[in-house]
Amino acid sequence: MESFIDIQKRLLPDLLEVMQKRHQILRSIRFMQPVGRRSLAQNMGLTERVLRSEVEFLNNQDLIDIKTSGMIMTKEGIQLLEKLESMMREISGINAMEQELKSLLNLHQIVIVPGNSDESPWVKEELGRASASSMKRRLKGNTIIAVTGGSTMAAVAEMLTPDLSDDTLFVPARGGIGEDVKNQANTICAKMAEHTKTRHRVLYVPDQVSKEVYKSFLKEPMIKEVLNLIKSANMVLHGIGDAITMAERRKTTDQDFEKITDGHAVGEAFGYYFNEAGEVVHKVPTIGLQLEDLSHIENVIAVAGGSSKAKAIRAYMKSAPPKTVLITDEGAARELLKG
């Protein structure tokens, strides 16, 4: 038997389109508030004329307030938005996409959030919120969570709240790679611990070093202790990078950069560069978690969004443990299904 929503799609498609558009406007206001009409129109790719009539309707329904500083959500608007979430996931086909991708990528679970983080910066916050929720569901007593760096992981940190277990310890999955301090694993671990009122440890070593330097680091008691904690992690939270972007961030040597490009690498994770077939074309000698360590870790959560990340996600997932939980957005999911 067809669901009520399926019947609506056939008999009243215009009604569903209007509902989706107003839902997107409400979501955008919630993440950008207080926001002016011009900024919101630019962010959503709408004309100010179209947005004006929608905003007036939402205001008349007491779902938003229009102030001199910009538009904000009302309490009633937030409550309505929360009630709409599950319905909108079915209407937009996200639930069906999750099942299709789960089978296609042979993964334990996939969570898709609406939107495309390449086009709308606030979608990263949604990725962060979904990641935080997934982490909380998997906490069991003493938990060591190893976290990689990157802007997506930083977004996850901002979404965490103090309702995590007191027995949680955050550790950096790897050393720093010379990126902005705010996006380094050490900084993100500190932010996660601060937001959850838990503990963290730091690993003050470079991401990639020579074999001689690596051996000398292992002799340092404090570094050895943190590395042992990292290897003992029972949850890993990591991103998936675009190969060329990551190579440039690492200030890769010309020789290694040539190996990456000649090998047609499209994705990177844990210092491994993958081509579209999922083959490793280059490996950076790094301090911290290695790809083979993931098979021994109970919970592995990979977070990556944006349609531009689809190739990187597909390439990495061919080597990822099947128990991996992938948290991505609609933009990446649609590109993955095209492929």
Image (spheres, grey):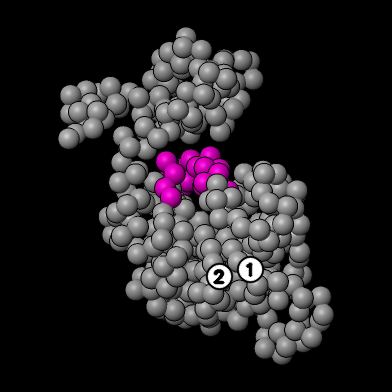
Depth check, front residue: 184 or 143: 143
Work out whether mark 1 precedes mark 2 in sequence or the reverse, and give the earlier one: 1
Left or right of residue 145: residue 18:
left
Residue at position x 45%, y 70% from top? 321
Label 1 is placed on what type of residue? Ala
| Residue 270 in the image, given as x and y percentages of width and height | 55, 71
Placement of the C terminus among the 4 image quadrants: bottom left
- Residue 254: image quadrant is bottom right
Q: How crowded is mark 1: few (under 14 residues within 10 Å), some or many (20 or more)?
A: many
- Name the residue: 39% across, 62% down: 107
SS class, disc 1: loop
Residue 233: mark? 1
Q: Which of 30 and 247 is in front in this view?
A: 30
Please state the horizontal and vertical placement of residue 338, each as a whole percent of the image. 27, 55
What's the CA distance linking mark 1 and mark 2? Answer: 7 Å
Q: In this view, does 63 lie to the left or right of 158?
A: left
Callout 2, which amino acid? Ile
Give the SS element for disc 2.
loop
Q: Would you name the residue on which mark 2 appears?
A: 297
Q: What stretch is highlighted in magenta?
A: 111-132
- List the single residue furthest toward the front: 141
Q: Do the residues labelled 1 and 2 touch (CB within 8 Å)?
A: yes
Q: Is residue 318 visible?
A: yes
At horizontal 66% and vertical 63% (from top left) the residue drawn is 144
Q: In this view, does 14 lie above or below 294?
A: above
Left or right: where 128 falls relative to 48: right
